[in-house]
Image (cartoon, rainbow, N blue to C red):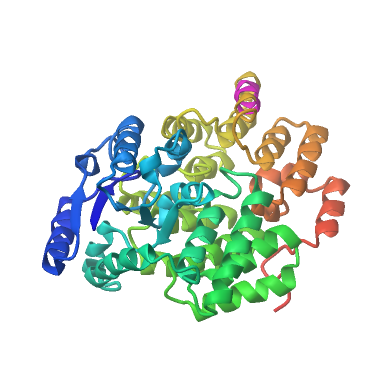
Amino acid sequence: MRIAVVAPSCPLKREAAERVEAIVAERGNCELVIHPQCFLSEGHFAGPDEARLGALREVMADRSVDAVWFARGGYGSNRIAEAALADMPEAARGKTYMGYSDAGFILAGFFNTGLDVAWGPMPQDVLRGDHGLENGEAAVRRAVDLYRQSLAKDPSYAQADAAIAFAYMSLADSYMPSHIAYDSSRTAARRALASDSLVADARALVAFANLALDWNFETNDLELRTAAEREPNSVQTQILYAVYLCTIGRTGEGLKAAQAAMTLDPLNPVASWSREECLYKARSYDQLIAEHAQTVASWPDPRFFYWDSFLGAAYREKGQFAQALAEYERAQQAAGDTPLYGYAVTLARAGEIAKARAILTRLQAYSRDHYVNPITFVAVYAALGDRDQAFAWLERTVADRTGWLWGIATWPEFDSLQQDPRLGQLIKRIGLPTGPSAPPR
């Protein structure tokens, strides 16, 4: 069995590569080929998009390769996922593709095209034991075993469905229409539970998707909390719980869940990001700014970016527009071609209306070919003082079933809408709980 390693996200540490090669050599039942691209570095990424895509496409087309192992998570695979799916080489079929975390963007696409995918440890995880976490070497050994199991194509393998469920959850709200992504996530998670009622993360994924799709907050709040209590060592479940709690305004509890995720995996940038998100929604702007330098120290590159810059938003809400705009300029560079709604909100709040509208125009153009969460338009129009357009887009947000809708009553971006009776009517319509004590426990 020949396994190729590529890095669609962040670089693989050479120490990790050497230790994994030693494990495979000791076992003697497979061959490991680590692509040189894994060691490239361009900012946060393992080389430019073209190099990461080229390496992936190369091993997909290589008939001598039986399986493709993604080197590590982080951020970046979403930038090449669409291109990786185009003109699929025939040799790509019949291989197994494995990873988790950021690799979920590619895994979800591969699954939809009928390729065999598996959710499991990655080569970088061999170093996890160095941080007082679950022994990383044992995790990598299990990963090699998982490859061999996946080749048996066991249709009842629950972890594979759980992997797909999490991949779709990762796509929701930011990269794929939320109602489609959440429904796909819930379907896969339910299949996982049907095969194995104890499979990790699946209960939390079902509850989170139910919250977005059905708005049954009291029942699914309990389900999500129960999942977090049953799986205290699951980083992904703790992150999901933190995001939900902080979005609806229960920031004290949410910060505890975010801290639990960071303790479990200090190098996970999404765990750190979720804590910054909670601090922002708690309006603890000074604490967010003070902790930000420590937060980015845990990320592979300080330019890590996802959804919005909470540092820039914190400066904005403090009225420090020069610092806020400087941060958003940096974040816009990291985001590439994706226009940042937070940048437009900040410009509008700073009185730079023409510049804010220019970003709004770019965002509208971008949305013709890409999914853009409709709630971003709500925020921009609210900042521009156009409440009618804000509420028109809010109805689209309701139809999209985005999880970010839960924050409409609590996020600072929407403060200017709070006195409009239309908002109260919408909150009542969807049964949205708000505040630190909602829903009832």
| Residue at point 80%, 40% (across, down) | 391
Question: In terms of image quadrants, where is residue 364?
Answer: top right
Question: In terms of image quadrants, where is residue 261?
Answer: bottom left
Q: Is residue 46 left or right of residue 315?
A: left
Q: Who is closer to the viewer here, 413 or 87?
A: 87
Residue 41 highlighted magenta (yes or no): no
Q: Position of residue 265 (x, y in %)?
A: 35, 64
Q: Position of residue 346 (x, y in %)?
A: 58, 33
Q: Who is closer to the viewer here, 262 or 58?
A: 58
Q: Is residue 309 visible in the rendered structure shown here? A: yes
Rendered-image quadrant of the C terminus: bottom right
Q: Is residue 252 visible in the rendered structure shown here? A: no
Instruction: Note whether 91 is above or below 358 in the view shown.
Output: below
Q: Who is closer to the viewer here, 63 or 202?
A: 63
Instruction: Note whether 264 is above or below 212 in the view shown.
Output: below
Q: How many marks?
A: 0
| Residue at point 63%, 30% (across, down) | 367
Q: Position of residue 220 (x, y in %)?
A: 68, 71
Main secondary structure of the magenta stretch: helix
Q: Position of residue 52 (x, y in %)?
A: 32, 37
Q: Is residue 11 left or right of residue 418?
A: left
Residues in magenta, as a range: 357-364
Q: Is residue 313 left or right of residue 394?
A: left
